[in-house]
Amino acid sequence: MPMQIQYQVIALVLLIGLLIFGFLVPEQIQKRKKAKEIDSIVSGDRVVTKHGICGTVQSVEQGLFVIACEPDGTRLQIAQWGIRGKQ
């Protein structure tokens, strides 16, 4: 194999490596950080759902959150994946 082709193959491998570490690794770190934040939610925390509903967590059971919304205290049962984060 000529040297020029070898350099092109090496450059391609390096480029793919940079893409993996430049895009995929930070995304995985962000997902883990978000999951840790959702797992740390306890009763009394104020949360926002992915659809913009704000409320206070009343209870946490098996991946479900029961939140009370203001002003009338309407209670909603939200799946864990439906929570955007703490307020």
Image (cartoon, rainbow, N blue to C red):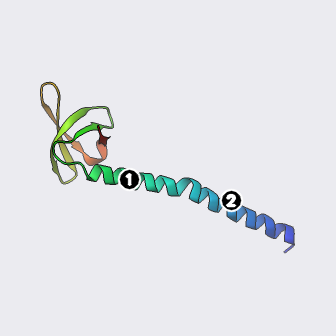
At label 1, which amino acid type do we have?
Answer: Lys
26 horizontally vs 34: left or right: right
- Residue at 33% over, 37% down: 50
Residue bearing mark 1 = 33
Callout 1: 10 Å neighbours few (<14), some, many (20+)?
few
- Residue density around tag 2, few if under 14, some if 14–19, many if 20 or more, within 10 Å: few
Q: Residue furthest bottom?
A: 1
Check disc 2 and give the amino acid type: Leu
Q: Which quadrant would residue 74 be assigned to in this image?
A: top left
Residue at which label 2 appears? 15
Q: Position of residue 49 (x, y in %)?
A: 29, 37
Query: What residue do we see at 53% from left, 56% from top?
Result: 24
- Residue contact at pointers 2 and 1, CB within 8 angstroms: no
> What x and y, as percent, mark residue 9?
75, 66
Secondary element under disc 1, as helix, strand or loop, is helix
Quadrant holding the N terminus: bottom right
- Left or right: 37 as drawn, with respect to 66: right
Q: Which of 87 and 69 is in front in this view?
A: 87
From the viewer's perspective, is 85 left or right of 1?
left
Helix, strand or loop status at disc 2: helix
**Residue 42 % position (x, y):** 19, 48
**Direction from residue 64 to residue 36 in the image, left or right:** right
Look at the picture and state if 9 lies above or below 79: below
- Residue at image position (30%, 42%) is 82
Q: In this view, does 4 lie above or below 52?
A: below
Comparing labels 2 and 1, the label whose residue is closer to the camera: 1
